[in-house]
Amino acid sequence: MLRLICIKLPQELKHRASSLTHGHFFSTSSVKPISELPNSKNPQSVTVSFLQNSCGLSLESAISASEKLNIENPKNPNSVLDLLRTHGLTQTHIRNLISSRPQLLSADLENTLKPNMELFESLGLSCASLAKMLCKDPRVLRVLESDAYTLVEFFRAHGFSDEQILTLTMKHPRLYLYDAHKIFKPKLDFFKSLGLSDLEIAKLLSPRPAILTRSLEKQIIPCVQELRRIVGTDENVLKALKRGYGIIEVNLEKVLKPNMSILISHGVPHSFALKLFF
């Protein structure tokens, strides 16, 4: 029911009554040798050739990617590809990964890539999940080892289980690009100030980690203040948040508040409308 009240109601409801019960409230592909590919301005360049022959990029994609990468010695790039294959990534995964982030081939293998891959595996990430996560945001592999471990330890210290941290990692890998103590801690502290425990916060945030990247001053706090005006008491605010943090991602002023007005204008008792939050 909470999801219902957070969806913008049809405008027709403003003009006519409507029943509440009807509210609408990857396969591996072969890599072609250069002789079979179209000519380009410099088809034999080391970088373009490597991207075509070793990574499976098309000529056009290889030329585009070569603008962000310069391979003088293929030793490190080959080691990076070997590492990815060792962890279960297919040629298709690799092609997609390098197409979007070619700089990955020049990353520090020993001090960044290997430790980070081991960290993600320690959280229980399977080969398939690892490939999916990396294709979603390959930048996480280039995060310094110390920063990646720091983030994991930060969440552990705040009551998140490894399973929940794994969920965070899969749903929103770019969390590893943030300074946890500077960006995330103030938000966790704010939720605690509302009366939520560490375990409750971890349980509620795990499915919706993007909330941690929202502005505390411009979105989260104003949302809670507006929610308090709607539901009346701090106790009700807490109940609504425990029901689902997704409500924080809703524009209460433009969506939820008008929806409440529409329901009430069509004869729904205010007390019944409030129950939609709990």
Image (cartoon, rainbow, N blue to C red):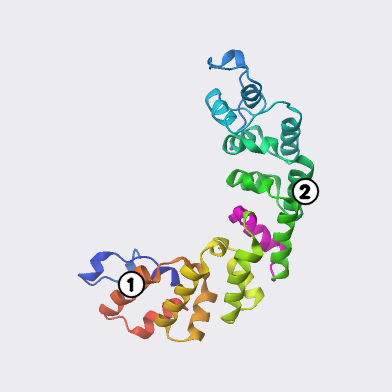
Q: Residue at x 44, y 81 (%)?
A: 228
When the figure is inspected, residue 237 is found, relative to residue 256, above or below; the finding is below
Residue 278 point in image, percent of width and height: 47, 79
Mark in the foreground, 1 or 2? 2
Residue neighbourhood size for the residue with mark 1, other residues' Cα within 10 Å, grouped as few (<14), some (14–19), many (≥20): many
Q: Residue at x 34, y 84 (%)?
A: 270
Q: Residue furthest right?
A: 110
The disc at residue 115 is 2
**Which stretch did the figure color magenta?**
159-176
Does dot 2 land on a helix, a strand or a loop?
A: helix
Q: Residue flagged by tag 2: what amino acid is it?
A: Pro
The disc at residue 259 is 1
Q: Nearer the viewer, residue 261 or 194?
A: 194
Residue 254 lies in the magenta-colored region: no
Q: Residue furthest left?
A: 15
Q: Nearer the viewer, residue 261 or 153?
A: 153
CA–CA distance between discs 1 and 2? 49 Å
Q: Residue at x 62, y 16 (%)?
A: 44
When the figure is inspected, residue 68 is found, relative to residue 187, above or below; the finding is above
In the image: residue 153, left or right of residue 253:
right
Q: Earlier in the sequence, mark 1 or mark 2?
A: 2
Residue 34 point in image, percent of width and height: 61, 16
